[in-house]
Image: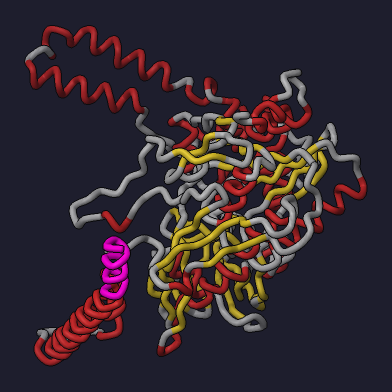
């Protein structure tokens, strides 16, 4: 009875504690707003130069939100189109990826059958003016804002094309640019259906269902691979509905916990599943986040399929977009995601961040949880794959060839010189093409510092500091010459990986996004491993063995 009385007293006292805390917070907010208003007003009256109150206000808000987490952000009126892109996968614009180099923003990749492509814009075209606004030295973000606008509105571009002297003027009509949730799907050899899902915007689940049922109706499928690599997430309901395609009705896929009761919600599968039996593999990597982690985590927790690849990003925070005055918005973290095993997928606890902390990911495993079959899974560090594949590393020379746009520029040159190439899955970098590429590199003033050279420089400085340099100078000179000799062969020694990126870049000029995807399938390590598991080509029946778990 005494325990019950204490519990009742604590229960009755708890609302008063909350009310007191709320009153204290309200006082602090009122006090802070008063101080802030005075600061801004006194600056306006007394500061030596003219101030821009709107810019200062936006800076102050962003600095305040930066103290919380990376996903709670202020959205000014000028960025509303970006919100539409995040939620709907569409925006008003010309339909092209753009990139900055050599002092200008350039067309990098026009989307097929959108305004940039229709107007004949090519990769490498430098954008000099947009509707009379000079774009020299403007950032990609600034140029992107100028290119966006209401569908149906016109804009005039002045561009400089590589190898041509005259300035070209193009008039384009903006369109609603809808980025595909599913850029490609196909049935691979052996009857494995393969679907790439790039994002979770509106109708993602519907489109995935249609793609899967189309392939299923026309083929005898032996398995399905859903590729979520690089998928940063999107709409929660789309993730739940995608799980529902392969998991029965009335299963809890994900639930959220927040500060207020209305943020605590359960999300169940609402429909009968389309297929609960087809062997399923989900591909993930370190860039698979949020909704991707809900799908892969739920599939893993239900033991409905296997996860292959690398550990996912670890974003288990839920954001709501709140409309505010003057056509501004704020994206606010309101709760955390928990998947069927009751684990949270969030990697970093931002609530424990202090001003001097450096927030970093950590590789230690969190608390243990169990899947439906009793397999051990872990909380707090994204989704750990059932079959882990180390990410491929890229050589220093390849990184610099790509970063300095050498590969990009050669692909532009190749496109001008060749009217056509074989199909995307047949085109290869021949000896002739690669030799021509090497000659092109030699004419580009291509320079870079290898990691070995960096380490050598440190060694020389340390030897001089410690007084050893004069005694070992002969050996150091020999080593330096050896490093230079090996570096001269980097283009030949790393031909395979350079050729893969070069092939992808060239194919994109002729066959756009789909061609790029098709050209990479044959050499895709994670995809080939998934196919091996589904087709049991190694005779070990890994799929069933891994899903059995602890009995």
- Residue, x 66% and y 56% (percent of image)? 251
Quadrant position of the N terminus in the picture: bottom left
- On whether residue 8 falls in the magenta region, the answer is yes
Residue furthest front as drawn = 1
- Residue, x 71% and y 56% (percent of image)? 244
- Left or right of residue 284: residue 243: right
Residue 318 percent coordinates (x, y): 47, 63
Residues 200 and 244: in front is 244
- Residue, x 65% and y 37% (percent of image)? 306
- Left or right of residue 425: residue 308: left
Residues 416 and 58: in front is 58
Viewer can see residue 111: no
- On whether residue 151 falls in the magenta region, the answer is no
Residues 312 and 30: in front is 30
Q: Which residues are magenta?
A: 1-13
Tell me if residue 91 comes above or below residue 394 in the rendering.
below
Tell me if residue 541 comes above or below residue 113 in the rendering.
above
Tell me if residue 130 comes above or below residue 30 in the rendering.
above
- Residue, x 62% and y 38% (percent of image)? 307
Residues 114 and 261: in front is 261
Residue 184 percent coordinates (x, y): 74, 51
Q: Decide whether the magenta segment is chiefly helix, strand or loop.
A: helix
Viewer can see residue 288: yes
Residue 473 percent coordinates (x, y): 18, 11
Residue 551 percent coordinates (x, y): 63, 29
């Amino acid at each position: 009875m005494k325990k019950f009385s204490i519990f009742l007293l604590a229960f009755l006292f708890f609302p008063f504690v909350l009310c007191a805390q709320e009153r204290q917070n309200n006082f602090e907010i009122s006090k802070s707003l008063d101080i802030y208003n005075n600061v801004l007003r006194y600056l306006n009256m007394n500061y030596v130069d003219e101030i821009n109150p709107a810019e200062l206000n936006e800076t102050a808000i962003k600095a305040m939100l930066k103290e919380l987490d990376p996903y709670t952000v202020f959205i000014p009126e000028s960025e509303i189109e970006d919100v539409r892109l995040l939620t709907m996968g569409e925006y008003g614009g010309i339909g092209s990826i753009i990139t900055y180099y050599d002092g200008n923003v350039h067309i990098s990749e026009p989307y097929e059958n959108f305004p940039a492509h229709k107007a004949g814009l090519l990769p490498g075209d430098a954008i000099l003016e947009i509707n009379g606004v000079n774009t020299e030295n403007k950032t990609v973000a600034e140029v992107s804002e100028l290119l966006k606008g209401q569908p149906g509105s016109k804009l005039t571009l002045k561009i400089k094309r590589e190898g041509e002297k005259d300035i070209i003027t193009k008039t384009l009509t903006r369109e609603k640019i809808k980025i595909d949730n599913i850029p490609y799907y196909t049935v691979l050899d052996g009857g494995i259906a393969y679907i790439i899902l790039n994002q979770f915007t509106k109708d993602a689940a519907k489109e995935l269902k249609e793609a899967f049922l189309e392939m299923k109706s026309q083929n005898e499928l032996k398995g399905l691979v859903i590729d979520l690599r690089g998928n940063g997430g999107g709409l929660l309901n789309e993730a739940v509905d995608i799980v529902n395609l392969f998991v029965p009705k009335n299963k809890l896929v994900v639930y959220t916990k927040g500060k207020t009761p209305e943020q605590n919600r359960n999300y169940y599968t609402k429909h009968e599943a389309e297929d609960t039996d087809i062997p399923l593999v989900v591909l993930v990597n370190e860039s698979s986040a949020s909704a991707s982690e809900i799908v892969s985590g739920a599939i893993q927790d239900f033991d409905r399929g296997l996860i292959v690849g690398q550990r996912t990003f670890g974003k288990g925070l839920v954001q709501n977009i709140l409309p505010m005055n003057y056509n501004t918005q704020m994206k606010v973290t309101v709760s955390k995601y928990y998947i069927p095993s009751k684990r949270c997928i969030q990697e970093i606890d931002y609530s424990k961040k202090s001003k001097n902390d450096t927030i970093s990911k950590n590789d230690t495993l969190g608390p243990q949880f169990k899947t439906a079959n009793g397999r051990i899974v872990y909380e707090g560090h994204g989704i750990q794959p059932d079959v882990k594949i180390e990410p491929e590393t890229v050589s220093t020379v390849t990184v610099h060839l790509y970063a300095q746009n050498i590969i990009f520029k050669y692909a532009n040159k190749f496109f001008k010189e060749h009217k056509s190439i074989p199909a995307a899955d047949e085109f290869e970098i021949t000896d002739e093409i690669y030799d021509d590429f090497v000659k092109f590199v030699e004419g580009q003033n291509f320079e870079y510092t290898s990691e070995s050279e960096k380490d050598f420089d440190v060694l020389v400085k340390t030897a001089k500091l410690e007084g050893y340099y004069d005694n070992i100078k002969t050996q150091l000179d020999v080593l330096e010459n050896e490093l230079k000799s090996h570096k001269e062969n980097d283009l030949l020694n790393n031909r395979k990986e350079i050729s893969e990126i070069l092939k992808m870049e060239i194919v994109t000029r002729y066959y756009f996004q789909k061609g790029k995807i098709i050209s990479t399938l044959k050499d895709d390590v994670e995809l080939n491993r998934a196919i091996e598991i589904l087709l049991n080509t190694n005779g070990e029946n890994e799929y069933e063995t891994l899903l059995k778990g602890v009995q």
